């Protein structure tokens, strides 16, 4: 038989592809935020604008610490491109602080706002 069997090669490549797809999002560094848990499907791993509210109430946009005025200015510039914005807030942050940041995001003209949570573990 002179044919080359490529099935084992394809199997190994698919396993490597799955391993890299699972580990690539974990290699991203960020702000330590204790997210609340909720049911939902995972977000796509595309380029996105991420706003995080840390436990102390500090606001971070893609890793850079900003105050509320700087956030307004950056969001107004970004609203022209109609980006997807994802908001992460520590579970210990007051609801008023989260609502304030969400209001500023909407006031800047951002239409696509998602809230990021951790998956709820089944018992």
Image (spheres, grey):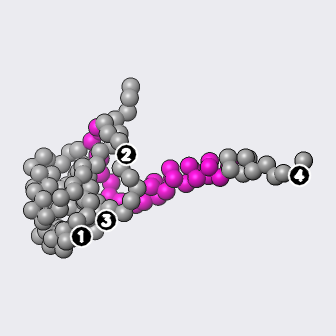
Residue at left offset 45%, top offset 55%: 25
Mark 4 crowd level (few <14, some 14–19, many ≥20, 10 Å Cα): few
Could you tell me how far apart the alpha carbons at marks 4 and 1 are, in whole angstroms? 56 Å
Residue 119, percent across and down? 35, 39
Q: How many marks on residues?
A: 4
Question: Which stretch appears magenta?
Answer: 12-38
Between disc 1 and disc 3, the foreground one is 1
Sequence-first tag of 2 and 3: 2
**Image marks 2 and 1: residues in contact by CB distance under 8 Å:** no
Q: To which residue does mark 4 refer?
A: 2
Q: Quadrant of residue 58?
A: bottom left
Could you tell me how far apart the alpha carbons at marks 2 and 1 are, in whole angstroms? 24 Å
User: Which residue is more in the foreground, 78 or 4?
Assistant: 4
Could you tell me how far apart the alpha carbons at marks 1 and 3 are, in whole angstroms? 20 Å
SS of the residue under disc 3: loop
Mark 1 crowd level (few <14, some 14–19, many ≥20, 10 Å Cα): few
Sequence-first tag of 2 and 1: 2
């Amino acid at each position: 038989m002179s044919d080359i069997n490529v099935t084992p090669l394809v199997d190994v490549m698919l396993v490597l592809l799955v391993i890299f797809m699972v580990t690539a999002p974990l290699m991203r560094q960020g702000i330590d935020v204790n997210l609340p848990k909720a049911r939902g499907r995972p977000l796509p791993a595309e380029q996105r604008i991420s706003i995080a509210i840390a436990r102390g109430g500090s606001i971070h946009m893609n890793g850079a610490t900003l105050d509320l005025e700087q956030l307004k200015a950056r969001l107004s510039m970004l609203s022209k491109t109609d980006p997807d914005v994802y908001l992460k807030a520590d579970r210990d942050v007051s609801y008023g602080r989260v609502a304030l940041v969400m209001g500023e995001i909407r006031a800047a003209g951002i239409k696509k706002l998602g809230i990021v949570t951790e998956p709820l573990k089944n018992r």
